[in-house]
Amino acid sequence: MTVKLYAFTCGIITGPRGHMMVGEVGDITFPVPAYLIEHPKGRALFDTGLHPGLRSQPEKRFGARRAAMFRIDLPPGAEISARLAAIGRDPDAIDLIISSHLHFDHVGGNALVPNATLVVQRREWAAGMEPDAAEKRAFFAVDYDLGHKLRLVDGEHDVFGDGSVVCLPTHGHTPGHQSLKVRLDGGDVVLAADSCYFCQTLRERRLPVMVHDREQFLASLDKLEALERAGARLFFGHDPEFWKTVPQAPAVIV
Ligand SMILES: [Zn+2]
């Protein structure tokens, strides 16, 4: 069964490097990825990038503190709905949005994909629905509490039932973060999302400042490393150098 994987950089963000990796100085500009997976049984996105409202009123969408810390660059046409339309895919005909987690740069485009069922770890959704916890974790319900149908999953989840697209729990960055393993003709790839921002995060165990659970985060990195040793290619969540090597849609990742 052939699965096709496409990558999109849906805007870029500039912010303090030390926020992303403890001990660093200066600023870093990093990509905001989203992916389309086409399976004979349906079309799924893995994350949806940024909401277009961040262009003009970032403080309204993710708070004044973060708006002061991060500069958003989302050119017209870079949002997920436009990227899909540009390759002839109708955003209204996407079946699933698989969310790695509920941060603004991963679920911001959910509003642009209205008919999809949201596939999210139950514990992540529970944290997102608890107003105090959500605020503390920088979850903004305006991004994800939009009435999408929900498929809440616990731990590993075989999305299409044939082992080709599998959610892998990689908690730690947030309570219920998940990565996605996709079986391509060229071998397995693992879309790490924010369980691993950069290649350096993995190689040097250099964690971000904001971590929900440090032990779980480190265990998730061990899991990613084991998958890599077994032959999988890892796609790092926000690594600008790595992303220069990723072909953008309409190119298919092989
Ligand atoms: Zn995140």
Image (spheres, rainbow, N blue to C red):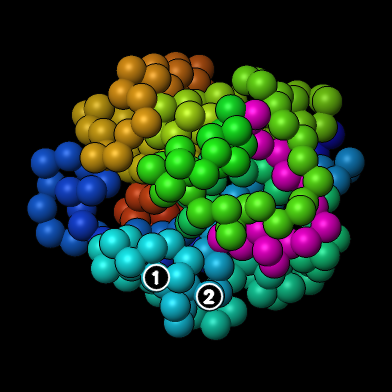
Q: Quadrant of residue 211?
A: top left
Comparing labels 1 and 2, the label whose residue is closer to the camera: 1
Q: Position of residue 247 (x, y in %)?
A: 53, 58
Q: Alpha carbon of mark 1 to alpha carbon of mark 2: how far?
A: 10 Å
On the question of residue 42 being in view, the answer is yes
Decide: is 214 above or below 97.
Answer: above
Instruction: Looking at this view, name the residue that lies furthest to the right.
Output: 41
Q: Quadrant of residue 216?
A: top left
Q: Quadrant of residue 229?
A: top left
Between residue 2 and residue 91, name the one nearer to us.
Answer: 91
Q: In percent of the image, x 43 and y 47: which residue is there?
A: 135
Q: In percent of the image, x 74 and y 25: which residue is there?
A: 158
Identified by mark 1, the residue type is Glu
Between residue 88 and residue 159, name the one nearer to us.
Answer: 159
Residue occupied by mark 1:
59
Position of the C terminus by quadrant: top right
* Left or right: 101, with 162 as reference point: left
Q: In percent of the image, x 77 and y 40: which residue is there?
A: 150
Circle 2 residues within 10 Å: few <14, some 14–19, many ≥20: few
Q: Position of residue 75 (x, y in %)?
A: 49, 80
Residue occupied by mark 2:
53
* Residue span colored magenta: 107-122
Q: Position of residue 209 (x, y in %)?
A: 24, 40
Q: Position of residue 39 (x, y in %)?
A: 81, 43
Q: Secondary structure at mark 1?
A: helix
Label 2 near ligand 1 (CB < 8 Å): no
Position of the N terminus by quadrant: top right
Sequence-earlier tag: 1 or 2: 2
